[in-house]
Image (cartoon, rainbow, N blue to C red):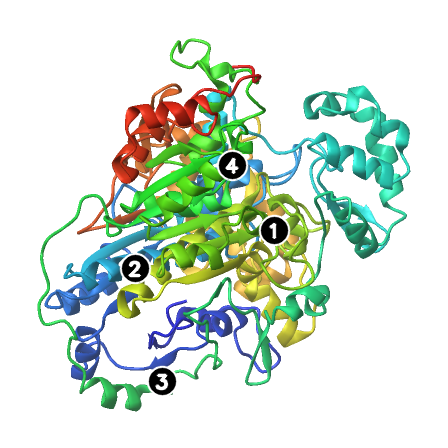
Amino acid sequence: MLADFGADVAVRDPHPLRGCGPFDSSGISIPAAVVLANKRSLKLDIDNKAWKQLVGSADIVVDDARPRSSDREWIDALLMDNKYVLHVVITAHGLTGARAEWPGNDLSASARTGWASVNGLQGRRPLKQSGYQASYQAGTLAFATVVSALIHRTHGGPGQLIDVALDDVSLMSFAPGILRSLYNGAPVKRRAHRDVTTGPVPVKDGHFALTITRPHFWQGAAKLLKLDDLANDERLQATASRNAHKDLFVERMQAAMAKWRKGDLFHSLSKIPVVAGPVFTMRELADNEHLNARGFFVDVEGVSYAGAPFLMSETPFSLLKQAPSPGADTKQLVDEWAKVSSAVSEVSSAAGADGPLTGYRGVVLTQAWSGSYATQLMALLGAEVIQVEARSRYDSWRGGGYAAPLAVGFADRPSAKNSWNCDCRFNSVNLNKQSVTLELDTDEGRSIFKRLVAKADFVAENFSPRVMGKLGLNYETLKTIKRDIIYCSISGYGHSGPWSPLPAIGGTIEPTSGMSGLLGYEDGVPLNSGQMYPDAVAGLFGFAGLALAIFHRERTGHGQRIDLSMQEANLSFVSDRWLEYEMTGAVPNPLGNRHAHFAPHGIFQTAGDDQWVAIAAETEIQWHTICTIAERPEWVGKFGDCAARKANEDALDREISEWTVTQDRDVLSERLSRAGVIAAPVLNGLEVAAESVFRERTAIAVTEHPEAGAWPQPAMPFHLSATPGRIRNAAPCKGAHSAEVLERLLRLNRAQYEALEAAGITGVTPPKGKVG
C-alpha cells in the first residue's frame, strides 16, 4: 500500500514469497506477483556499503525478523544511527512475550485468536480464515500505523519502532466474539447447520445469502418467494422466535430459492429492499457490472489486478507495474540513493503517550462495526473521537432496543442497568470514544452537528449513500463549513456505480466480494465466516484512508473525500486468488485449512471434546521435527518432500490425525512450537480472553465500563515505541458526553443544554414513549 499511494518502495531479494505457490505457467509465484507489484528490487550483500547507505537514508524500513534471529541483529545494527527512521516489524507473535521466538502464520493466527473456533460447522473441523487474512490485516494495520507515525513526524516527532503481530490484529478483529462470549458466560461456537439463517444456500446457478433478521426483511423475502403464509406467521417475525421454529420455514424457503437464478433473486430482493448477496466466483467478478463501472480492476502491463481498496478524491491509488525480477533495480537504486540525505534536519525526541494522532478530532456518525472499528483505531492512537448518535433510535450494535434484557453475565453486576449500554458488540469497537446524542432530523440538531464539524479534522460514517445527502450533511455541504475537512464514507458498494443504492451488510458482502466462495471445506461448498468479518476489513481500510488523508492534508492543506466500498475492500483481501484466476484461468475454490504450496497445513483433532490443534510445516526442517516429535520416522520416507506431501495430502492428514487425537491439545501445541514448528491450539472466545501473552502485550486489557463493569477485551493491536497510545476509557454510555462536549466545544451553558434535552434533541435517557 505504501507503493500504491506514492512511496518509492524497494524490496531486498531473494524474497521468500518468490518460491511460494501457486505459480503461473511460466513459474512466477502468484503471491509474490501480488505483494511485489509497484516495487523495485535490489540484491545486495548485507555487508555492502551501498546497502548500509540505502537503509540509513530510508524513511521507513519494514522487516519480519523474529527477536533473536541473525536477521534481527544485522537489521537493528544498520538502523542504530538512523534516529529518523520509522522501523516496522511484522511477525506472527510480536517482538515481546513468551511466543516472540516461535514461528507462526495465518493458520496459527486463526487458531489462537478464536476465529477458527467459530468458522465452519459443528461436528466438523474448525476452519481458518481463507487465504492470507491475518497477513493482509497485519499489513493494512502496519500501513495505517506507519502513516500515523509519519503524521507525528511532520510535527518534529521522532523515528520509532512499530511492532505489529498477526496474532494481535486478528484478535482485534475478533473482539465482538470475545466480549460476547464473556457477557454470555459461554463461548461462541461454530454453526450447527448450514441453512438460510446462517449463510449461503443453493440456488439454480450457485449459492446465495439472504438476510432475514428484521421483520420487514423476513416479510419481503417470504412474499417474493410466494410464501405469504410464512410472511405473516406471528411466530416468525422476531429473530429469536424464528430461530426456534426453523422447522416451519427453512426447507420451504430454501426450496423456493433453489428455483431462482442468483442475479435475478438479488435484484428482485434489492428493490423491496431486502439485504442479500449472491456468492460470486472470481470468473463472475471479472464480469461484474458494478466493479467494472467503478473501474476497480486495473490493467498492469496486460494483466488485470485488483485495484484500490478505497477511493480518495485527492490522493490517488496508482498501480503501474508488475513485480520486478530479482535485483532488476539494484544499480539504479544505488546511484539514486547515494545522493539522498534525510529530509528532516531536526528531530525531536519527545514521545507522546496518547499516540501519534493526539490533537486530531473526529466527529463521526459510525454505527455497527465497520465505521466504528475504523474510528476506534484512530482513537486508540490518540485522536479525539466524538460519536454522534440519535437519541430516539439506537445503534443496532447497542442491542435489541430499549426494552431488551441484559445478558446473563450481568446477573451479579448491579451497575448494569441499561441493555443499550451493556451490549458486547458496541462495547468491543468503541474504546476511547465520547458519545453525544443529536436528532439530525431536526433543524437544531443539524445546526449543532455542523458547528461540531467546524471544530473537527475528520468526519466518518457508514450509512447507505443516500442518507447523508437526505440530511443535508454530505461532503459537499460539510466542506463549505470546514474547507479542509476529511470525510470518510463506508458503504456496501460505494457512492458510484449501478449497485451504489443497494443495501448491504457484512454477511452479504462476504458473498459478493468473492470471500464466501473461498471459505469452506474441501467439498467446495461456500460458507460465511462465524461473525461478519467483512466489517473488520472495511474498518481497517477506513483507518488507513483517514490516516492517509490527514497526512496528505499536513503536506498540502487540502481535505478530501474517501469513498470506501466494502465489496472492493474485501476483494482486495483475496487479491491473490483473483490474480490466480487471471494468470491461470482456473477458478479458485475453498482449500479448507490447506495451503496451496505447503503440507502438512491443517487443523487436527486432539484428545477431549472439540479440542483441536493447528499444525503446519513450511520448511523441511519443520517437517522432520514433526516426524521426530510424533515418533514416526517412517513418515520422512513415506511422504518425502513438500511436493510429495501435497500429492498425498489426504493420506498425510489421516496419519497425523491418528497421532494428534491421542495428544493433549495445549501440551502438543507448545511442544511443537518450542521445537520450531508452526502450531497453535484452537482457542474459543473465553480461552482467548484469559490468554496470558495477549495480556502481557496489552493486546487484551481489562477495561472498566461505567455500567458493564470490568472485562478483559481486545485493546491495542499496535505497539509504537515513542507514541504508544493507550486505553483512556471504555466504550461510552449513550449520550454520556453530550453536556460536556457541547459546553467545551460550542460554549453551550447548562440552561441551553437542558432546553435541548427537553426538546428531545439530546440527552442520556430514552425519549418519552420508549421503555427503559
Earlier residue among tags 2 and 4: 2
Tell me, yes or no, if residue 666 can be seen here.
Answer: yes
Earlier residue among tags 3 and 4: 3
Residue that mark 4 sits on: 442
Residue that mark 2 sits on: 146
Q: Left or right: where does residue 97 sit relative to residue 453? A: left
Question: Which amino acid type is marked by label 3?
Answer: Gly
The residue at 47%/25% (across/down) is 759
Residue 602's x, y, as percent?
Answer: 55, 48
Please say if 378 is above or below 557.
Answer: above
Earlier residue among tags 1 and 2: 2
Q: Are marks 3 and 1 in contact (CB under 8 Å)?
A: no
Earlier residue among tags 3 and 2: 2
The residue at 55%/20% (across/down) is 402
Q: Residues within 10 Å of mark 2 (few under 14, many from 20)?
A: many
Residue that mark 3 sits on: 327
Q: Which mark is residue 670?
A: none
Q: Nearer the viewer, residue 451 or 514?
A: 451
Q: Left or right: where does residue 419 sit relative to residue 150? A: right
The residue at 31%/34% (across/down) is 741
Tell me, yes or no, if residue 684 can be seen here.
Answer: no
Looking at the rendered image, the disc whose residue lies closer to the viewer, 2 or 4, is 4
